[in-house]
Image: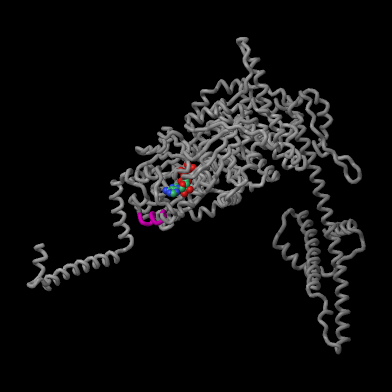
Amino acid sequence: MGKTADSRGPGGRPDPVRSFNRWKKKHSHKQSQKKQLRKQLKKPEWQVEREAISRLTQNYEKINVNEITRFSDFPLSKKTLKGLQEAQYRLVTEIQKQTIGLALQGKDVLGAAKTGSGKTLAFLVPVLEALYRLQWTSTDGLGVLIISPTRELAYQTFEVLRKVGKNHDFSAGLIIGGKDLKHEAERINNINILVCTPGRLLQHMDETICFHATNLQMLVLDEADRILDMGFADTMNAIIENLPKKRQTLLFSATQTKSVKDLARLSLKNPEYIWVHEKAKYSTPATLEQNYIVCELQQKISVLYSFLRSHLKKKSIVFFSSCKEVQYLYRVFCRLRPGISILALHGRQQQMRRMEVYNEFVRKRSAVLFATDIAARGLDFPAVNWVLQFDCPEDANTYIHRAGRTARYKEDGEALLILLPSEEKGMVQQLLQKKVPVKEIKINPEKLIDVQKKLESFLAQDKDLKERAQRCFVSYIRSVYLMKDKEIFDVSTLPIPEYALSLGLAVAPRVRFLQKMQKQPTKELMVSQDNQVIEPRAPSLTNDEVEEFRAYFNEKMSILQKGGRRPEGTEYTLANGISDEEEEEKEDEEDLEEKLTKAKESQPQSVPRTGEAKEASGQFLDRDEEEEEDGHDADFFTVKRHNVFGLDLQENKALQKKEPSKSSVKKKVTKVAEAKKVMKRNFKVNKKITFTDEGELLQQWPQVQKSVSRDAEEEDSAGGINLDKAKERLQEEDKFDKEEYRKKIKAKHREKRLKEREARREASKRQAKLTEEEEAFLDWSEDDDDDGFDPSTLPDPDKHRSSEESDSEDLENKISDTKKKQGMRKRNNSGVEDVGSTGRSRKKAKWETLEPLDTGLSLAEDEELVLHLLKSQS
Ligand SMILES: Nc1ncnc2c1ncn2[C@@H]1O[C@H](COP(=O)(O)OP(=O)(O)OP(=O)(O)O)[C@@H](O)[C@H]1O
């Protein structure tokens, strides 16, 4: 009130002086604000940014998880927020809410949350902010490493990063292999955020000059439990060695590792464990409906076909345990034409094809993707309705990841697991332990469409398909054999012949390790010392053995992928970014498995290999196995196994010391002993005989001995191998061969000489003819002078020239012949050749020997004549 009275002048009118003062005050305040703004605008961008950064970092400590519902509730840079908004990310998910704040504060974080809950953004947002805070530029080099277990997952993460981080100025790169290493190497040094697979990253660390991670600020492991498991152990150890100790580390997965050992490897500093759904009733998304069916192995293909026929409008992923199964069944199902488009994704495809399939499946509204476990983790295909696990997953974690390809981020989805009767109890138990709610449902037998006959007819027409079926068969059996959990996976309970029939094969391909395995129980009975009857059981590998084997396999594959070259002092697990999961499906997997079987055999208690000869004549086909036989390393289990764990030299020695008894017990098999064994068996080599055009008999293989001592050898062949005599014989044979060779070479040279002379003679005849023609032409042109000149009547200048050239060559040849003869004579005289004088004499001879020599004699006679002349000259 008083204020109003004051501001008014007499008569209630406003006091103009006071009003003016008030206006002046307001105006000057506005002016000063404008001035400040103008001043700020003049500031360099980096300074404005720095001030904004300092305001943000001050707010980091004030983050209250309970108050956060949106990304904008976090103190994030405008660039990141803009990127998130443009990609339609506004509200945060639980894992994002709980981890982003901690990560912004610079803490090491282990985050676990159900599949499809948004873990990718939970680490990408802190990644962008970390580099923004430091005002990172391309000249600062590599700032963040994001490692994914598969190429597809790395690609997907990279795409999200590009989308969300598009307003930032950092450079991001994707290094996943399958591309030219050089091409990548040229760009890798300018990358600030690198999304990669472990193998390819290590390859660059080792092979790309100038590539280093010394400035690294943050390491992110997506699907951390997978990356830290045995399959990637060596690669990851080597990568970590190349990283600075002072850095921030973020680990994310739906099934997080709790292994202290793993975490120690990463040297985490007081990490924050965030298990979002630890107390949840189930470990899988609430919107995911999960069922399983139990059916016989031989029914599975028909079940799958019937399933597809009844879900034609849906988008489904079908998981198989091996690559060869995917390859075969994909082809067969394409031929069966179920009425839905089928795609296949596995580790043996070309990178381009893999990318095509991935993008195609993302785009499709209804389709079915046949895949191996390379598609099990992290992939975010939109709107997948069904996940069907055709083969039982190796453990509950794999189940969770596979099933998690559907029902992602608030969407619904269904998962169906197909179990064999022998797998049911163990697997269901494991799933329930892991809080996975699965219910059994029954197949309606009336709706089951049997496709076996169709498959049989396909295979009868197509040999290639049949071979694929055989490989698929062996591959599946092996995958079961190799499974760690022997309570669930028992290869001896599989209905082998029925399974083969269901694939369309009339006869089951031979699976060598199975045959050997079946023989083993007999041996066990034999070695039983306390006269107790031991139940025959399938020999199974211990978990450790399987793990060792897998790790060894990875290592081997990486070397193969690098073309067999392995830089000294480095231990690769994977190369070209091919994940362990992919590699498990490679052909060499089988090679190694076979090695494992062999290694087991080589142990003292293994079955003696008496049945080998019988097996060799076995009626069954097994191409893969035959290939695997080659190049097997008998001692792989002892020597290579040490490498698997990256033990240092001391440990190696210690291990070797511990095992002297084993090696001394084993008798060393020399080549001689092997040969004797073969001789005892009356082993006969097949002969390859061919006939010449004249009907003459020629033995091509094995080569018949031609030396003189052959008879002698035959005489004492009864007495076994005499090494000295064998050596002598070899020497004789060698001499004989050399002599033969010399003769052949001589004959060849002679023939060549004769041909050359013949050619020269021909050339000189042609020359004579041409000179005649030329003269005739000149005469003719003079006669027809009035009719005008027709150029087409001219002789071809090229021809003419070439004939001239050939003449001059001819001439030179002659000269060189003469020279040779002279040279021969000279050598004969003095034994030393004077290069200078030869050159001069050549020049001279060129002008002297112009006339072609035609004596009218035969070549041999010519030669003799020349020699005679030369002799008489000397
Ligand atoms: N805050 C968000 N708002 C909206 N959608 C989101 C959000 N966060 C993530 N999503 C979406 O959720 C889906 C799953 O996210 P993401 O792939 O990160 O899951 P994940 O937890 O990594 O799954 P997985 O364990 O299978 O790897 C994606 O399609 C993603 O776009």
Main SS category, magenta section: helix
Question: Residue 712 or 231: which is nearer the viewer?
Answer: 231
In this view, the residue farthest toward the front is: 11
In the rendered view, tell whether residue 841 sits above or below residue 109: below
Please say which color scheme the image uses.
Answer: one colour
For the record, the magenta segment spans 77-84
Q: Residue at x 61, y 23 (%)?
A: 539
Relative placement, left or right, of 492 versus 772 is: left
Image vertical order of residue 468 relative to residue 75, above or below: above
Q: Position of residue 563 (x, y in %)?
A: 60, 45
Left or right, 444 with reference to 776: left
Viewer can see residue 143: yes
For residue 579, above or below residue 210:
above
Residue 764 is situated, as x and y percent measured from the top left of the image, at 85, 67
Please give left or right for residue 193 compared with residue 177 in the image.
left
- Inspect this view and state whether residue 558 appears: no
Q: In the picture provided, is 580 more to the left or to the right than 746?
A: left
Residue 8: x %, y % from top left: 10, 69
The image quadrant where one finds the C terminus is: bottom right
- Quarter containing the N terminus: bottom left
- Viewer-proximal residue among 490 and 72: 72
Q: Position of residue 208 (x, y in %)?
A: 50, 50
Q: Nearer the viewer, residue 263 or 869?
A: 263
Q: Is 519 or 823 nearer to us in this picture?
A: 519
Q: Residue furthest top?
A: 531
Q: At x 83% / y 76%, what residue is drawn? A: 795
Q: Residue furthest left?
A: 10
Residue 598 counted in the magenta span:
no
